Image (cartoon, helix red, strand yellow):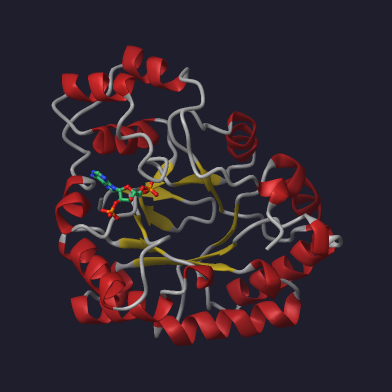
Amino acid sequence: VKDFWMLNNGVRIPCVGFGTWQTPDGETAVQAVKSALEAGYVHIDTAAAYDNEASVGRGIREAGVKREDLFVTSKLWNANRGYDKTMAAFEKTMKDLGLEYLDLYLIHWPAVANQFENWQELNLSTWRAFEQLYKDGRIRAIGLSNFMPHHMEPLMAEAKIRPMVNQIEFHPGQMQRETVEYCRQHDILVEAWSPLGTGRMLTNPTLQSIAGKYEKSVAQLCIRWCLQNEVLPLPKSVTPSRIRENAQVFDFKISRDDMEQINKMGYIGGSGLVPDEIDF
Ligand code: A2P
């Protein structure tokens, strides 16, 4: 979990991050983050919309890890897009987390549906704010989340600073190949949210049988499979034993045949969230 990959601006990113979506605010989130930092994670992923940033910040402080040894990501919520709102939302996130700077800030969703008719303009003015915060040294890297190629294209056409990351739902049966290919072509690192399919991968017989061959759990198999696909996994758990388990993914390698078998699996469940339909 302390191995690093490199973003297109030269910033180093720890190649397994700790996810906090659906982690309840309060003591649960504080303890989860502390457990993760004790288990050796140095990369924490949160978002304003997770409603747990203050607790995540408390967990970081209570763990006593040096800020420069940590990589912290947050995300801007849909309704706060636009230059001025973005600036205000960023300050709120920093205040809640209790941090001086962020390592990575993402636009949470392209949010194109219904009340967001002017989404291209909104995303662009948001990106201008991100570029400014980046230039001001408040954020070390900037990026997107849940953007598909048709959401990225209009932004890429106008961006002065290109995104460094796109965080998408990615797990067996949900590989978003076109989006990943587009990101590869533009040197944008892909991160996987819900690498365990929000837990739905764990009972799949095919994955169970492959994991068994390596004497690993399905969770470890899915995380390792992300890494070998060069997609950065962000597993979430609030359970200390699972948090530790999910970090033990550097002592085995999935064979080429097994990678192929997992890569060709059809849809076997996931969050059910579709970028073009999100209207909140
Ligand atoms: P919990 O947080 O109660 O420990 P994803 O990262 O794909 O969103 O998946 C998160 C879900 O998977 C959570 O419900 C989490 O449960 C569960 N989970 C995480 N790691 C493991 C593991 N190693 N074994 C079993 N379940 C896990």
Is residue 44 shown left or right of residue 130? left
Could you tell me which residue is drawn at 13 percent across and 26 percent down? 215
**Residue 136 falls in image quadrant:** bottom right
Q: Position of residue 6 (x, y in %)?
A: 43, 49
**Quarter in which the C terminus is drawn:** bottom right
**Residue 206 falls in image quadrant:** top left
Q: Is residue 39 above or below residue 148?
A: below
Q: Nearer the viewer, residue 239 or 16?
A: 239
Q: Is residue 155 above or below residue 28?
A: above
Is residue 257 shown left or right of residue 247? right
Residue placed furthest toward the top? 257
Q: Position of residue 257 (x, y in %)?
A: 34, 12
Q: Position of residue 272 (x, y in %)?
A: 56, 43
Q: Position of residue 53 (x, y in %)?
A: 42, 76
User: In the rendered image, is residue 262 in sight?
Assistant: yes
Is residue 108 shown left or right of residue 24? right
Could you tell me which residue is drawn at 59 percent across and 29 percent down? 177
Q: Nearer the viewer, residue 117 or 190?
A: 117
Q: Nearer the viewer, residue 96 or 218?
A: 218
User: In the rendered image, is residue 64 in sight?
Assistant: no
Could you tell me which residue is drawn at 24 percent across and 19 percent down? 209
Q: Total label count?
A: 0
Could you tell me which residue is drawn at 26 percent across and 77 percent down? 27
Q: Is residue 19 above or below residue 226?
A: below
